[in-house]
Image (cartoon, rainbow, N blue to C red):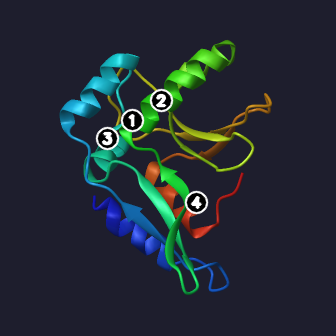
Amino acid sequence: MDWKAKFVEAYKARASDAPLARPSFRDGASEIVIARMEESFAHRLPLSLRSLLSQTDGVTEEIEIEHHGWMVSSIVIYSVDEMIETNLFMRRENGDRNVDRYWFFSTAGTDGIQFGMTASADVSEDASIFAWYPDETEDKHMSDSMLRFLIGWCTGRATV
């Protein structure tokens, strides 16, 4: 799947009254870097997230500022380094909440809400995506696939 094209399509499908925004991509993460991350957490990434990271090691959203160009406004997908840092932090600070059942891959950008895919020692094609709330609110099921989640989130149709 061409993840970059899917992001661009999703941003083009935003409501006409939404601020002008676009995705910004990085070079893809190497298989070695992804495998090291999986090994360090003893979980395999779902193939959808693995594929996305191999094409772009993280995605940010940029908004256009009149007369000033483009500015990064939010993280859409963490880089591998950001995933490692976030997942280590979440396990250290919230271990009593069974957070190791997720691969945290993004943030809602508000109230400490994190997005996570169901983690497994086995390889799966895709996995359910949940919004994790730090205030112990029950986790909210967002989607049963990465593609449907990203389309919903980037178009503004999915909310927390």
24 displayed left or right of 137: left
Q: Nearer the viewer, mark 3 or mark 1?
A: 1
The quadrant in which residue 158 appears is bottom right
Q: Amino acid at mark 4?
A: Trp
Inter-mark Cα distance, 4 to 3: 19 Å
The residue that mark 3 highlights is 50
- Give the amino acid type for the residue marked by disc 1 in the picture: Asp
Q: Earlier in the sequence, mark 3 or mark 1?
A: 3
Which residue carries the number 2 mark?
85
Residue 34 in percent (x, y) is at 28, 33
Q: Amino acid at mark 3?
A: Arg
Q: Compare marks 4 and 1 and give the one earlier in the sequence.
A: 1
- Quadrant housing the N terminus: bottom left
The answer to whether mark 1 and mark 2 are in CB contact below 8 A is yes
Which residue is painted at 56% across and 24% down in the image? 89
Q: Which mark is residue 81?
A: 1
Q: Residue at x 32, y 56 (%)?
A: 26
Q: Residues within 10 Å of mark 1 (few under 14, many from 20)?
A: some
Question: How far across and how far down the image is residue 83, in percent?
Answer: 45, 35
Q: Residue furthest front?
A: 68
- Tell which circle, 4 or 3, labels the residue nearer the N-terminal end: 3
Q: Nearer the viewer, residue 151 or 18?
A: 18
Residue tagged 4: 153
* Residue density around tag 3, few if under 14, some if 14–19, many if 20 or more, within 10 Å: some
Under tag 3, what secondary structure?
A: helix
Q: Label 4: how many residues lie within 10 Å, few (<14), some (14-19) or many (20+)?
A: some
* Numbered disc 4: secondary structure: helix
Answer whether residue 149 is visible to the viewer in this image: no
Residue at image location 42% in from the left, 74% down from the top: 9
Q: Which label sits in the foreground, 2 or 4?
A: 2
